[in-house]
Every structure is written in C-alpha cells, then in structure tokens.
Image (cartoon, rainbow, N blue to C red):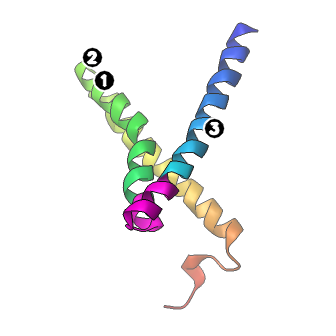
C-alpha cells in the first residue's frame, strides 16, 4: 500500500513540475524574445533528457556497466520516436509521411 502511495506522490510531483516547466518556458520565451520553438528545443528537450543522462553517467561511473547506458539511450530514443509517430498519426488529418513534398 505504501508503495502505491509513493508512486502516486511521485507521479503528482512529475505532472506538477512538467506543467510549471512549460509555463516558465513560455515566460522565458516571451521575456527573452527567443521564441517558443527555440525555448522548447533548448530548455524542454534538455530538461526532459536529464533522466537518460543521469542513468548513463551513473551506470558507467558508479555501477561499471556501460551496457545499461547504451540500452537506456537506444531504448529511450526508440520509445520517443514511437510516441512521436503515434501522436503524428492521431493529431494530424494526414500523417507527415504521406504528405507530398
């Protein structure tokens, strides 16, 4: 029971932090004049890639198993691409892959 409570608490913290990060990214883009796309690429992508960075560095330096770092990077990249493909298919009237260039 306590494990589920910890899971729900961590999930709530992640959702809250993600919402705040998005809000602050918009504020930074507006005040700096860099644009939302640029802030999204730099700030949001950097922050959301931190778990992979920590896993990769700690698996090599602390645990001494570089295979975990490679698996994490490749698995994360593949899963992120799957998410983007699903969202592209669901969101747009026609997926990008079928549009004429």
Residue linked to disc 2: 62
Alpha carbons under labels 2 and 1: distance apart = 5 Å
In the image as oriented, which residue stretches furthest toward the top? 2
Residue linked to disc 3: 15
In the image as oriented, which residue stretches furthest toward the bottom? 100
Asked which secondary structure carries label 3, the reply is helix
Residue at figure coordinates x 70%, y 24% from the top left: 8
Instruction: Check the picture and name the quadrant holding the N terminus.
Output: top right
3 or 97: nearer the viewer: 3
71 or 5: nearer the viewer: 5
Q: Which labelled disc corresponds to residue 58?
A: 1
In the image as oriented, which residue stretches furthest toward the right? 1
Q: Is residue 6 above or below residue 56?
A: above
Q: Which residues are magenta?
A: 25-39
First along the sequence among labels 3 and 2: 3
Asked which secondary structure carries label 2, the reply is loop
| Residue depth check, mark 3 versus mark 2: number of the one nearer the observer | 3
Q: Is residue 96 left or right of residue 59?
A: right
Asked which secondary structure carries label 1, the reply is helix
Give the class, few, some or many, for how many residues have Cα within 10 Å of label 1's Cα (few <14, many ≥20). some
Alpha carbons under labels 3 and 1: distance apart = 25 Å
């Amino acid at each position: 029971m306590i494990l589920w409570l910890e899971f729900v608490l961590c999930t709530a913290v992640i959702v809250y932090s993600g919402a705040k990060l998005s809000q602050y990214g918009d504020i930074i883009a507006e005040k700096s004049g860099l644009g939302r796309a640029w802030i999204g690429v730099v700030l949001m992508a950097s922050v959301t890639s931190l778990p992979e960075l920590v896993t990769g560095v700690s698996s090599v330096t602390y645990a001494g198993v570089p295979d975990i770092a490679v698996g994490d990077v490749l698995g994360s990249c593949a899963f992120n691409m799957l998410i983007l493909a699903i969202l592209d298919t669901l969101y747009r009237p026609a997926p990008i892959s079928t549009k004429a260039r």
